Amino acid sequence: MRLSGLQKEVLALYRRCLREAAKKPIESRDNFKAFARSEFRRNTAMDKRDFGAIEYLLRKGERQLEMYASPGITNISR
């Protein structure tokens, strides 16, 4: 199955989220991974052709990743 450019972008963002979670302290890594998984799963039912919404969520995810990647953030909770 070939992926579209937008699908590749979503997967790349997900991988970057998991990589950033691996950089966090051991005791909070699972919290970061669970948060990333839940955010992506929450939007899996979205229509694949709703490009505007997908692009919006990608931008939002990029901003969240940038914020959570900062060294001052050591834990996250839902």
Image (cartoon, rainbow, N blue to C red):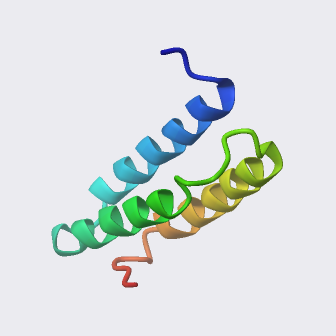
- Which residue ends up furthest to the right in the rendered image? 52
**Which residue is nearer to you in this view: 71 or 33?**
33
Relative placement, left or right, of 38 versus 46 is left
Relative placement, left or right, of 29 versus 38 is left
Query: Where is residue 28, by image quadrant?
Result: bottom left
Residue 45 screen position, x and y as percent:
56, 54
Residue 57 screen position, x and y as percent:
68, 57
4 vs 27: above or below: above
Locate the C terminus by quadrant: bottom left
- Which residue ends up furthest to the left in the rendered image? 27
Relative placement, left or right, of 75 versus 14 is left
Query: Where is residue 21, by image quadrant?
Result: bottom left
**Which residue is nearer to you in this view: 49 or 29?**
49
Query: At 48% from the left edge and 15% from the top edge, which residue is drawn?
Result: 1
Query: At 38% from the left edge and 59% from the top edge, which residue is drawn?
Result: 37
**Which residue is nearer to you in this view: 75 or 47?**
47
Q: How many marks?
A: 0
Query: Where is residue 26, by image quadrant?
Result: bottom left
Residue 49 screen position, x and y as percent:
74, 39
Residue 56 screen position, x and y as percent:
76, 56
**Which residue is nearer to you in this view: 44 or 71?**
44
Query: At 63% from the left edge and 53% from the top edge, which residue is drawn?
Result: 46
